[in-house]
Image: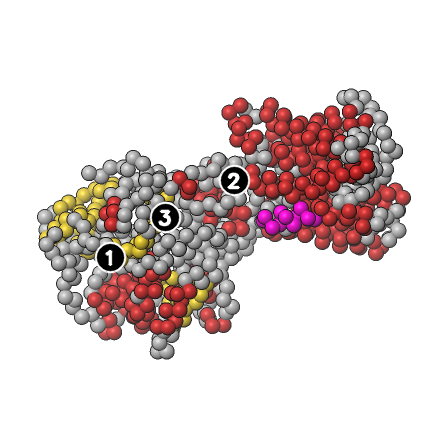
Amino acid sequence: MIKKEPDLLIQATPMLRQEMTTPRAMLDVWIALIPVILAAVWFFGVGALLLLLTTIAGGLMTEWVFTPADKRRGVMRDNSSLLTGLLLGLTLPPGLPLWMAFLGGAAAIGLGKLIWGGLGSNLFNPALVGRAFLLGTFPIAMTTWSPAMGPGHFFEVQGSLFALPFQTPVYDAVSAATPLGLMKFEQQSTALSKLLIGNTSGSLGETSGLLLLLGGLFLLWRRDLDWRIPTAIFASAALFSGLLYLVNPVQFPGPLFTLFSGSLLFGAIYMATDPVTSPLSPRGAWIFGIGIGFLIVLIRGFGGLPEGVMYAILLMNGATPLIDRYTQPRVFGRQARSG
Amino acid sequence: MHSLNPMNLLRGSFRHGVHPAAHKEQTVDLPIQRVPFGDRYLMPLGQHIGAPSKPVVGVGQRLYRGQIIAEPGAFVSTFLHSPVTGRVIDIGPHRHTDGTFKPAIEIEADPYATQQLPPAQTRDWKKLDITAFIGEVQRAGIVGMGGAAFPAHVKYSIPEGQQITELLVNGAECEPYLTNDHRLMVERPEALLRGIEILLEKLGAARATIGVEANKPDAIEILRDHLSPDLPVEVVSLPVKYPQGAEKMLIKAVYGQEVPAGQLPRDLGVTVNNVGTVVAIADWFDTGMPLIERVVTVSGPGAAYPSNLIVPLGTSVRDVLSFCGGLRSETREVVMGGPMMGSPIASLDVPVMKGTSGILAFTNTETLRPPEYPCIRCGRCLEACPYFLNPSRLARLAKARLFSEMKDYRVQDCVECGSCTFTCPSGIPIVQLIRTAKDNLAHASRKGEPT
């Protein structure tokens, strides 16, 4: 008399889902970075595009090789390696030989993500792991900056890009110090307008402050971004650099220069906000951001290299599990507790 | 804690929660229709948490509509009444809504009966003391009509030394698709206020507050029009948010206070009652009708003619659906209750019970799940969870079957509202994993195993 309806599914509620998906969130960051990519091509020529494609290819190929065949379809569809490759590429100097960029992409995915257990399991931001690998392995190539050129040189691809593997690259142009390098070694500031527009030397994606902020606004609007992290980074970097500036305005830059020079904007908006490697809770996000801002100022002011965003973020990535543990949200109807 | 005065507090809501599309437009303006009597009714003996009821009738016995057919098996248990005039044809295991077989009384309706309620003996509630009142509520078989079907008389049994000062009437109806409470407020405001009057007097509460989400402006307006100066009742419009109708969230939204974990609303001097429950109390004292029928919303993309219906308890889902045009051929899943917290049914032959607020039919659009991706720790579930749990962590632990570690993350505080699963961009069935973990923990503790 009573039988199971052959056609009825038994699938537990909730039946409803919101629309955002993980691959879509990754794609959103890509979309946010399109103006930045275009600016990189504008300032550094079509070679910039070659570099980005190389890091992405290095990452995707590594992922394909080291993922079990039955899981490849799912893994390749989540868009995360596509994004890691792009983020890494945007942190590279415009004249970096392509073979190095390829290795960097492979290191980002292989050492930054896969050995931890894949997407969602890694402790450190994969793109920054790739960059740290390159900076450690090829310190000279990673700190040789070619000047921003402009559209007249659009099709001139720098010869150093095609350097043969394990050969010393030969650079076409005279290398140009970045605004941070000028600041650190020659106590020479760069005009804020140049930093905003981006016609300075530096990594591919870091130079134009305005476009980076624009992409950040897009991500905010799409709710892909934890606004607390960049806000905390800006606030703490401005505060600590302001203090140093008050102490010694000749040696240390002011807060505005600190915020808009180097990769601070890029790191704060696109790297530190990587959800996998940043704390879960709102309180944790504030601590994380404040720590990054402080470390950036510390490393820039007292370290051996002019830039410190990468190490600042990587160090705070390492602190994330601990931050998470001590910032568990207070459960409804319960007293706050620590640990 | 007893200084709850809603007048002095800023009206807000609870924190966190989600905003699923309401999907109420299909049925919101449809008046409640009565489903005609059918030929067979099935009354499961266990319709709620607590002990199942014990049958007091035998196979073959003739019954009149509203006659008691089962009595409470314990204090947390209620009476059951026959929804029709007819005859008992079976007492034994029948398919339950949860898919198992559970004892139930099967009744065949008398096709020649008028199905009138027998003349009611007058029940002067004013003369009843609180104990007699609680007995009457139990005798009427009244339970919470919002879904959980917790016996109402248990809520009114206040331990010595405690006093209810606030009666909070739950008209939030935050579950998408459902409009049964909404229609009840629009169509029967007098009965609702009558029930409030009875409860205020019997519980000795100082005032009543009806919490209604702002997406039901007609209900708010009609209720406000019916308020009388003699009765201290206020209608509060709440911002639309899920799960506003969860008891503790509604208290937070209306009074701004958190019920401490492990405590009950009555520890704050509050009792929360669904509008359906309050109307059922009014009906019992006004007409002598026990809980033998309820309002059910039939809706969802798979329902041919979405409707709001008065359904005699025990009517099979199949009969309810065939009254309103049946299911579309695209239907893939039928859910009893709301789309967020209801349960899917395997068979259309299961009966409508006291806690059945809706029958929803879903098609491939809602049932096809996107592929699951790894958790990227985006934190959306943390910002959704109204209990401020860490669903991301809980899901990770559940997948690793580290159930006892989940207790450190307060898994027992989870009310399974499903906001986490709703909001997860990686398509992880978080609340389903948590339910499984809680089942495992409950099983282990029943067996006395260390967990």
Seen from the viewer's position, the closer of residues B411 and A228 is A228
Q: Chain of mark 1?
A: B
Q: Quadrant of residue B446?
A: top left
Q: Chain of mark 2?
A: B
- Helix, strand or loop for the magenta stretch, by majority: helix
Alpha carbon distance from label 1 to label 3: 20 Å
- Judge if badges 2 and 1 mark residues of a common chain: yes
Alpha carbon distance from label 2 to label 1: 43 Å
The magenta segment: A213-223
Say whether residue A219 is magenta.
yes
Residue type highlighted by circle 1: Arg
Seen from the viewer's position, the closer of residues B337 and B392 is B337
Q: Residue at x 63, y 36 (%)?
A: A83
Q: Chain of mark 3?
A: B
Q: Is residue A319 above or below residue A143?
A: below
Q: Is residue A121 above or below residue B175?
A: above
Residue type highlighted by circle 2: Ser
- Earlier in the chain: of badge 2 and badge 3, it is 3
Q: Residue at x 69, y 42 (%)?
A: A35
Pointer 3: what residue? B300
Q: Secondary structure at mark 1?
A: strand
x, y percent for residue A273: 64, 44
Check residue A100 in the rendering and tell me which mark sits there, or answer none: none
How many residues crowd mark 3 within 10 Å: few (<14), some (14–19), many (20+)? many
How many residues crowd mark 1 within 10 Å: few (<14), some (14–19), many (20+)? some
Check residue B426 in the rendering and tell me which mark sits there, or answer none: 2
Q: Residue at x 79, y 24 (%)?
A: A163
Seen from the viewer's position, the closer of residues B420 and B191 is B191
